[in-house]
Image (spheres, rainbow, N blue to C red):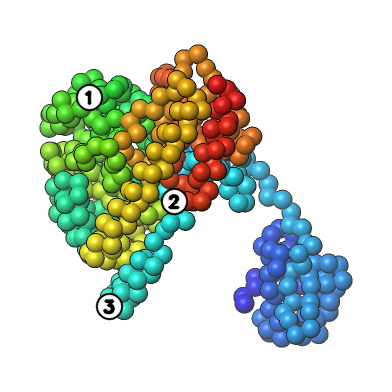
Amino acid sequence: MDLHLELRPSGGRRRALEDALRGAIRDGRLPRGTRLPSTRSLAAELGLSRGTVSAAYDQLTEEGYLTTRPGSATRVSDMSTPVPAAPPPAGVLPVPSAGAVAWRASPGGPAHDLRPGLPDVSAFPVRAWLRATRHVLATAPAEIFGACDPRGRIELRTALAGYLARTRGVVTTPDLIVITTGFVQTLNLLATAIDGPVAMEDPGHDFYREVVRRTGHDVVPLPVDELGARTGTLTPDVAAAVVTPTHQYPMGVPLHPRRRRALRDWAVGGGLVIEDDYDGEFRYDRQPVGALQGTAPEHVVYFGTTSTTLGPALRLAWMAVPPALIGPLTEAKLHADAHTEALGQLVLARLIETHDYDRLIRAARLRYRRRRDLLLARLTAALPGARFPGVAAGLRALLLLPPDGPAEADLLAACERRGIALRGASPLWQTAGPEGLLIGYAAAPERAYPRALDALAETLKDFS
């Protein structure tokens, strides 16, 4: 193994090697259990004698930094303690996890994972992904390992154009699709094509609002009621509107047909609609609602992702864009990161072409529907008077709390004490709105999910 060590000249070569190894162990660059190079290879690498390296190893073994066994490699001792990492500077926020949860992070994650917006990653289709990967590696030319079109691999763009037309009613072509790493990158790319305020649903995803603000755009609240976004409030000075018309986040309602028409008319009049179809594949008690993009493809940017169908770690998402924007967005993508990772794109294209992707989604849809039904049964009994609007689709439920209590902050504190990871609804409002909890029913592994619901039901009972 390669090992980078800086030997300070003072104090002799052996002392310099000992100090360098101690420093690497203390600051965590050599974690516990790390296997060190042999004395012969490290001596050759550093230009030292083998005897010098052996003596340094022996000294650090006596001090407890290293451990040796006959016939085995020298390793960093389990007793060694790295120096704790310094806290982030004042004003620097930690990197948020998906869905900003109310729990303290631990190496094993939360005891009860009810985070919204996440799939059950323990159900990731390893065999299907491996089968598709083997096919790609066995049949694709060597050029797949080189740079690709900033828009993404043509194989995936072609597969997506057919898949989105068939399943979501999207009207597009492979030339008008751009593969991205997720909605955050999509918003940043679109910011280069937008000049003016951006309307975002209220309530809506608070993290995405901050992403838009950081691009330099003003965010205008777009009120939401039981019929979805109040599109009639959009004015000509608004440059773009970010909406979730299929399954509003977090209220869960689909956009009313009359308001869909109003939104389309506003876009045709000069606005740009950014349609976030974040969980359009998962519907249970209603007929599927087609994408708004299909009614005005020259004025709507459609976004989709594998984050909820397969897993957020894949970093595979897409947007179908109007013809007038494909040039600027391709250039923006080129200068952002050249292109999205290519091998995963080809694997996903293979899954779509073989309809394995359809089968995986259908299986997940059945699994998540059972989980949703169990959640509603358990929690309505635990907290009479609680309401769950818009649970006919998606991967999470919004529990609206009764006006007479309990308070959202008190519930979140109680959930945190029990190790329950979920979200409060209050940060999702730009203005003000009812308190509640946003509960994901997909993130927990299958066997752990009932226990997570039990823990949450017991917490709610304490407040009923």
User: Which residue is painted at 68% across and 46% down in the image?
Assistant: 86
Residue 53 placement: quadrant: bottom right
The residue where tag 3 is placed is 139
Q: CA distance from mark 1 to mark 3?
A: 49 Å
Crowding at dot 2, Cα within 10 Å, few <14 / some 14-19 / many 20+, comes out as many
The residue where tag 1 is placed is 231
Query: SS at mark 2?
Result: loop
Q: Residue furthest right?
A: 62
Mark sitting earlier along the chain (3/2): 2
Residue 385 lies, with reference to residue 62, above or below; the image says above
Q: Are marks 3 and 2 in contact (CB under 8 Å)?
A: no
User: Which residue is painted at 73% across and 81% down in the image?
Assistant: 72
Mark sitting earlier along the chain (1/3): 3
Going by the numbered disc 3, the residue's amino acid type is Thr
Please name which of the two marks, 3 or 2, marks the residue nearer to the observer. Answer: 2
Crowding at dot 1, Cα within 10 Å, few <14 / some 14-19 / many 20+, comes out as many
Q: Which mark is residue 120?
A: 2
